[in-house]
Image (spheres, grey):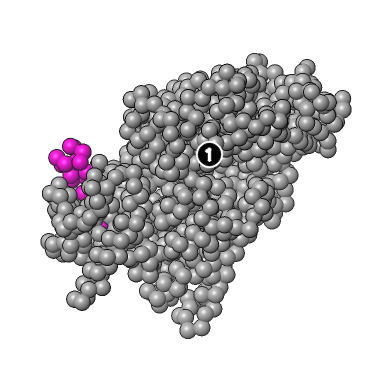
Amino acid sequence: MADSLLSLLFGPDGLSPPEWLRLALAGGSRSRPCCQICGSYGHRRRDCTAVGVIAGVIKSGLRAGESSSGRGGPWRGGRRGGEGGGGRGGPWRGGGLWRGGRGGGGEGSSRGGGHKGGRGGFSPTTTQFQGDAVLVTEMDKMTISGDNDNETIALSKRVLAFRDKQWVFPIRKEYNTTSGQPTYVIANYYELKTSTKTKIVRYVFEMTGPNRSKEMVDSFIQREFPAVVEYLCPDYGGYLYAPEEWTPGKQHFTYPAGDEFEGQTFTLKSRLVLNVDGYRDYLTASDVPTSSILPLAHEETENCVIPVAFYAVSMALNAIIIRNPRIKNTYLIHEKGNTMYDSRKGKVLSQDPCSISGLDTGHSAQIIVGLHASVRPGSQRCLVNASKVTNLYYRTLPMEDIVNLREGTYGQGVNLENRLLDKTEEKGVNQCWTGVLIRVDLPDGTSQHRVLKRVHTGNAQQVIWETREGVQVTVEMYSIRMGRPLRFPKVQLLSFKPQRGSIGRCEFPIEWCRAAEGQKFKVRLAASGSRDMIYHSASAPFEYLATLKDEFSNMFHRAQDNLTLSRFGLDFGRELLKIQARTLAMPRVMMGRNSTADIDSDNGSWRPRGKSFHSPAALLPYILLEIRTGARAVRVDPGVGKPFKGLIIALLGKCRGYGMARTEVAASGEFTLWLTSSRDDPRVDIENLFKGRIEGFKGGAAGVQVPLIFCLLPGSDSRYYNAIKRAGDVLSGVLTICMDGNKTSNQRIARDPGSYCETLALKVNLKCGGINHSTQSDRVLQRIFPELENNTVMLLGADVSHSGRRDLPSISAIVGSYEPSHSRLYSEVAYQKNQEMIENMAEGVRSHLDRFHDKHKTLPRFIVMFRDGVSESQYRQVLDREVVAIDAAVDRAFLQSGIQRTPERPKLVVLVVGKRHHTRFFPPGATDKRHKTLPGLVVDRAITAIYEKDFFLQAHAAIQGTPRPAHYFVIRDDMDLSDTQIQELVFTWSFSFGRSFRSVSYAPPAYCADLACGRARAWIQHKVDDIRGGENLYPASASGSNSSSDITAVAQANLHGIAGDCGRLHEDLKETMWYI
């Protein structure tokens, strides 16, 4: 691309400009009929924005060259740079256009001469690619400058003419940002090539009847339109896409009794020709809508940050690219949207993936690898984001085997017993399997697919069926009559949701049932299961890249082997995109006594050898608590085991080495709580211990406060952890630090507990009120705002955690910082109905502002909010609802009487942090697992939003597998920051997370909000498990159906019931980092 463009500009000999460029320089009017710079047909080459930029560069170079005593000349540029050129070369070898420096040049260097720029330099060394890769357009490397820095916007055809449009979100100021070291990366994006043949028509597709599955949609198309199966592309959400010339013979389809489609109706209506040309113009900026209003969430298709006017085209393209692999590969499991999994490649989890009520339910799951491919808007082109994905699915095992997976018996050949399941086992089956599609194999040889509701109260000897002849018999007798006697007639039946044609039968024996294929595993894994999942799914960048290329070619195929693509005039690019990126410099991290941490730039971490914490705290009075199982009766003994005591001695020694005081003080109390069985719920016994023993220390006659408890758990069972955290956080108001007994008993840790104790020491100092390290983010801010003083910036983070069911409450958390290091973040948590938007945003922000004012006697000058967990389709909702609530809280605090006001209302910046995207970056030429992209990698072009302000930032080094960058989208920017300024600030703050001596993958305020949500989830998990297990804890006035009104009534009852029973954060912990 670069060579062809240079040849076009300066001729094949590279010495003289062609006629059309001389005309452009002279202001002439003759030119060729189409543009050969950007490849667009909407204007002529002379009118291309690129020509104006190049002409301006060359004119400046001419002036600089003619007046300079250096090596300049008409085409080589002045030695000391010029307003447009600089460096030792011309427009291609010289420096940048705006932000000067010492020199540079080459492929878009950021340090070149430019306006008021330095003395010129040489082309930087860049890593070369091995093999072919698609280079993003040359126009992505250049910028246009207006009369001042604030008018600098993108090149290509995103030009000054569009600055006056009314944009919903802040738009970019620059596309060629200048900070960091320039580099190249490979992105997991292919170009989706369109043509003049790309004409798409959309039909509204309505389907009614008992079967509304994707398979039924495909069967209908195969039956009614067999000749065009590959050209009719449903999105399985209400639309059908076809070539423009196709029309159906009829619009309404019904079927007579006895037909295989009996009861099903299908309707095609509301034909609409989609504006594909307009979508293409939007990507190339030939036409920009008056506002970038985002679409609402769509159930089946991943959303793009594009206006509503062109969202329909994006949905259509997503449905088209997925059509061929779906109909050609019957082994694929088609998830929601454009994700498909290969059912042939399942891997069973190994040891103890998860346990529910004594059942090893995790062994009924398997890891399946798949591929995601979705259409995305790109700079000057349409792209397809392709990524490797892994997920957990139920194995298609007989239910009798699954229910038989008793804890600790997996693989030992233990058979299901012919007896009633006890309450614990019944609860475990309900929690794991409710809502899962089950295949029921009936004795007459037929099969039904039914959704499991719960374990029935009766067994086959108790439940009566009525045959078609009207005879009433037990299920056991029915089985004998059908020649298929039951082996487990005493085990409860499974109860299913009603289905047409079942003649009232909704209960079936467990031995007739097995999990249907393609059912996603719904149970949360234990720590061991999560580690196993990561181990199987993680792959080094070079392995990921090779797998991605092979799988994409094998699954999707290109136009010559893909009739769907060729009919619509589409095709995939041959290679993944190669794009420009930058690696930011490591920030300065301060430790104690004004010392600086030595950061390893390869992994974003540091070892504070010989250094103390930035602000070491005094160790709070503490208690040791050890929990053991296997006693005949529950009891509490004084003292703890020697291994636990030795671990605490090592931990306190580590805290002393980091400068913490009072580490030589002995524990205020030591207890061992003995429980009877690992299957019993420990919550009540642990709560009784806290109420009877721990609170006595806290409020004793001597006034001794004991807010810190070191607790050794018997294993990784989350029930112990949840019970301890609820007792400490909610009931007693004491800080707790839990340790996994399985981990501490590991021989490596027992032999050398240094690194393990270092991690714990970080938590101890934070919980005791200290600061582990501090980033110099105030220096970055002072470069932006020289008049800035300390204590004038507050960081906020917000997140919402969901329970996975509409009738269960969500938990929201809002965290805030009150000091310059931003390492201590305090949290407000609340229960709310199951939704992503935070209901108490105004109250939470106001609480943080009040505390900030109490501490500093003034309000912050700037507020930066990081909102975690929202999808692209919800950006507008965040702006319209949550940001409005933040404004209300700020206004109320600013206008409050008696408050010391800042000179002006606090300015607000809101960024959405995205983690669940499919974008990955790979270093060029990676050949083994040591080659990974480095921390500080920033990509803000080619694959990002075309007009709005967003970027990808990889702030961390991946411990396993391929790093996933965080995606930041700016919702609001009262500070009017440049892209460079925002990126530097976010990267600096990524080193402020106090729980580790390394950078984290996304902004710590959002990270801490996520942690606070997870901790609050522990308070209510026992109630959530009971409801999932089939218990009706909080009856609501509902009819018992699955209607929206009934679900809302149940959800409201559950919300109020759980909030009332589980309580809220204890007042004594409000200004502590209780969640860390």
The one of 698 and 679 positioned closer to us in this rendering = 679
Above or below residue 987? Residue 361 is above
Q: Residue furthest top?
A: 561
Q: Which quarter of the rendered picture does the N terminus lie within?
A: top right
Asked whether the viewer can see residue 759, the reply is: no
Give how far across and how far down residue 342 sits, in percent: 53, 23
Please give the residue where the numbered disc 1 appears in the rendered image: 458
Quarter-of-image position of residue 658: bottom left
Give how far across and how far down residue 554 sits, in percent: 56, 18
Give how far across and how far down residue 99 sits, in percent: 48, 49
Mark 1 lies on a secondary structure that is: strand
* Magenta-highlighted residues: 744-768
Q: How many numbered marks have been drawn onto this rendered protein structure? A: 1
Give how far across and how far down residue 970 sits, in percent: 55, 53
Q: Residue at the spot x=41%, y=29% of the render?
A: 416
Q: Residue at the spot x=32%, y=33% of the render?
A: 408
Asked whether the viewer can see residue 807, the reply is: yes
